[in-house]
Image (cartoon, rainbow, N blue to C red):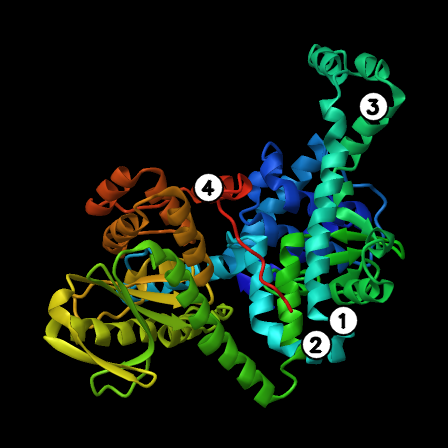
């Protein structure tokens, strides 16, 4: 049993479990499913301030409750009393998270600079892995599944009993079904008769004004406030109207856990079943969507598992995920972005001079070179022990971002130092006069997010020389969102991109952020202020709510993503 400064981590987890087990499982999981989906609207709830990761903390509490044998006698609903209880739960959760970082002492002068650096890296990696919610959009998640698994449709049908196209359609239908129910559940708010009720209720005449409403409106009002999670519930019959019964049954079986099953999820860092099966079966008729945005990701994990039964299958699928998918998607994104530039030359899977190492992408656009390397590797869960954790973190970083930087560096140096370089691509060879190139930018695109350690490369990247520029390292989803936004918002998208890369490079070594899109949003909202901040010596901590900039564009249909064809 591990302890920290007198804190028993197992006992703390049990303490939370005992607190929440007074509530029925159904009412508790329904409350937190609603909180996960609608927490931006629930910010007035005091306990939410204690939850540092609304999603991770909520699904941990759900599984902690389901892992208890207690039936529970109280229905959970929001009240001042229950808010105080959840605040206490939130405080214990903070202790639990701190446990994993108990030896972090950045400001302890007795600890060496190297050890403090390791502790900082460990803390950032841990928080990023366990607590960081990322911004991407449903279409992007669906497209990840389609891109990778489209060639394996016969195997999917054979091994799961359902085809890929139907799986994708069911994921889309799930969200559409929620949207329809959410709109219907709130429709009473737009009834003209509600205006007098609201005014009277604000004047302290709630019960009297409620009784004066027609019964139908009273019922709708009470249903909405007593069961705000109702739009997250569904029955198989809801789906049978649009899909084959067998397919619906398979879908529900593959992607749901039963509320009455036995679970053993006590610790915060344990794998959470809801990450793989984000639906809870409440009873034989009713299911609860805990987090629909997770559905495509859960399908991705499921298909990856069933299509890698042998080492050979795993090797082939990983090769496709990296070499084929990531490179082709990156190329498509840049091809579209540079499509309106006057002078564009591009190379993919190319070699320079006599260097035997293949490089990924090179664009020369209006005399500016963009050297791009694509790296697909997974950022693994950080261990608790700082020394071992940082070794694993550095290993993952070096295999992906460091290697990408070094490959970019070779091309960058050839362009900057040689009068001409030979470029071989496929069966074509040509000599490039480098005197025509006036600037070079290097970009490392990753399939996975390395969060804080990717955003401030000053933490881990070993540059070849102190004078060399940092690359821009970015996850493929963030790259797609940012470049799409530049294309939608600016006629001079190319110049804006150059500006961002020039300013952004200055921030490494003094930037604390978990999401590149927070930094992108700072630039997009006020480019001049961003430039001033980048050119200053200030340590920068972007507002994590800045990425709402992209949500506004997305929901106003200015930022669009087309779902790929499965067939």
Q: Between tags 2 and 4, which lies in front? A: 2
Choose the circle earlier in sequence order: 1 or 4: 1
Choose the circle earlier in sequence order: 3 or 4: 3
The percent coordinates of residue 221 (x first, y second) are 79, 27
In the rendered structure, are the residues bearing label 2 and label 3 in contact, judged by CB atoms less than 8 Å apart?
no
The residue tagged with tag 2: helix, strand or loop?
helix
Q: Nearer the viewer, residue 211 or 56?
A: 211
Classify mark 1: residues with Cα within 10 Å, few (<14), some (14-19) or many (20+): some
Classify mark 3: residues with Cα within 10 Å, few (<14), some (14-19) or many (20+): some
Residue 188, by quadrant, is top right
Q: CA distance from mark 1 to mark 3?
A: 42 Å
Q: Which residue is mark 4?
A: 545
In the rendered structure, are the residues bearing label 2 and label 1 in contact, judged by CB atoms less than 8 Å apart?
yes
Q: Does residue 323 appear to the left or right of 275 in the view shown?
A: left
For the image, the number of numbered tags is 4
Q: CA distance from mark 1 to mark 4?
A: 39 Å
Classify mark 4: residues with Cα within 10 Å, few (<14), some (14-19) or many (20+): few
Q: Which residue is mark 3?
A: 217
425 to 554, vertically: above or below: below
Q: Is residue 72 at least partly visible in the picture?
A: yes
Q: Which residue is mark 1?
A: 162
Residue at 72 percent of width and 25 percent of height: 189
Q: CA distance from mark 3 to mark 4?
A: 36 Å
Q: Which residue is mark 2?
A: 156
């Amino acid at each position: 049993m591990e302890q920290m400064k007198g804190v028993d981590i197992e006992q703390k987890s049990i303490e939370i479990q005992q607190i929440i087990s007074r509530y029925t499982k159904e009412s508790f999981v329904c409350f937190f499913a609603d909180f996960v989906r609608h927490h931006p609207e629930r910010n007035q709830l005091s306990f939410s301030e204690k939850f540092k990761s609304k999603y991770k903390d909520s699904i941990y509490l759900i599984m902690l409750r389901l892992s208890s044998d207690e039936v529970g006698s109280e229905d959970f609903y929001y009240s001042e009393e229950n808010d105080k209880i959840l605040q206490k739960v939130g405080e214990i959760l903070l202790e639990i998270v701190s446990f994993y970082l108990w030896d972090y002492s950045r400001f302890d002068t007795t600890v060496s600079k190297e050890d403090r650096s390791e502790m900082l890296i460990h803390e950032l990696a841990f928080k990023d892995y366990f607590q960081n919610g990322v911004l991407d959009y449903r279409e992007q998640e669906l497209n990840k599944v389609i891109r990778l698994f489209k060639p394996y449709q016969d195997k999917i049908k054979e091994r799961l009993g359902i085809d890929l196209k139907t799986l994708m359609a069911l994921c889309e239908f799930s969200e559409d079904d929620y949207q329809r129910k959410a709109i219907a559940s709130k429709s009473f708010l737009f009834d003209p008769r509600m205006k007098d009720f609201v005014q009277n209720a604000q004047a302290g005449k709630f019960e009297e004004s409620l009784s004066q409403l027609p019964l139908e409106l009273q019922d709708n009002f009470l249903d909405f406030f007593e069961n705000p999670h109702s739009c997250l519930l569904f029955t198989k019959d809801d789906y049978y109207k649009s899909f084959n019964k067998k397919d619906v049954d398979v879908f529900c079986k593959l992607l749901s856990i039963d509320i009455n099953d036995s679970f053993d999820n006590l610790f915060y860092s344990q794998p959470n079943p809801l990450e793989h099966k984000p639906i809870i079966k409440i009873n034989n008729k009713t299911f609860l969507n805990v987090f629909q945005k997770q559905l495509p990701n859960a399908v991705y994990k499921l298909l990856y598992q069933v299509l890698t039964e042998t080492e050979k299958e795993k090797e082939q699928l990983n090769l496709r995920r990296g070499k084929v998918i990531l490179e082709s998607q990156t190329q498509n994104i840049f091809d579209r972005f540079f499509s309106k530039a006057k002078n564009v030359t591009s190379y993919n899977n190319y070699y320079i001079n006599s260097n035997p190492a293949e490089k990924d992408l090179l664009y020369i656009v209006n005399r500016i070179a963009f050297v791009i390397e694509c790296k697909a590797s997974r950022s693994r869960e950080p261990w608790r022990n700082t020394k071992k954790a940082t070794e694993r973190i550095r290993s993952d970083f070096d295999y992906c971002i460091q290697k990408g930087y070094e490959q970019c560096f070779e091309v960058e140096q050839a362009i900057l130092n040689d009068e001409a370089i030979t470029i071989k691509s496929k069966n074509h060879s040509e000599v490039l006069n480098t005197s025509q190139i006036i600037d070079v930018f290097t970009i490392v695109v990753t399939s996975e997010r390395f969060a804080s350690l990717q955003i401030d490369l000053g933490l881990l990247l070993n540059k070849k020389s102190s004078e060399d520029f940092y690359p821009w390292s970015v996850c493929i989803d963030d790259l797609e969102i940012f470049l799409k936004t530049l294309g939608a918002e600016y006629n001079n998208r190319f110049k804006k991109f150059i500006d961002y890369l020039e300013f952004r490079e200055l921030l490494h070594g003094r930037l604390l952020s978990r999401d590149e899109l927070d930094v992108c949003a700072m630039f997009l909202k006020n480019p001049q202020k961003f430039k001033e901040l980048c050119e200053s010596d200030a340590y920068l901590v972007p507002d994590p709510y800045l990425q709402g900039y992209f949500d506004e564009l997305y929901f106003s249909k200015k930022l669009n993503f087309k779902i790929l064809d499965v067939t």
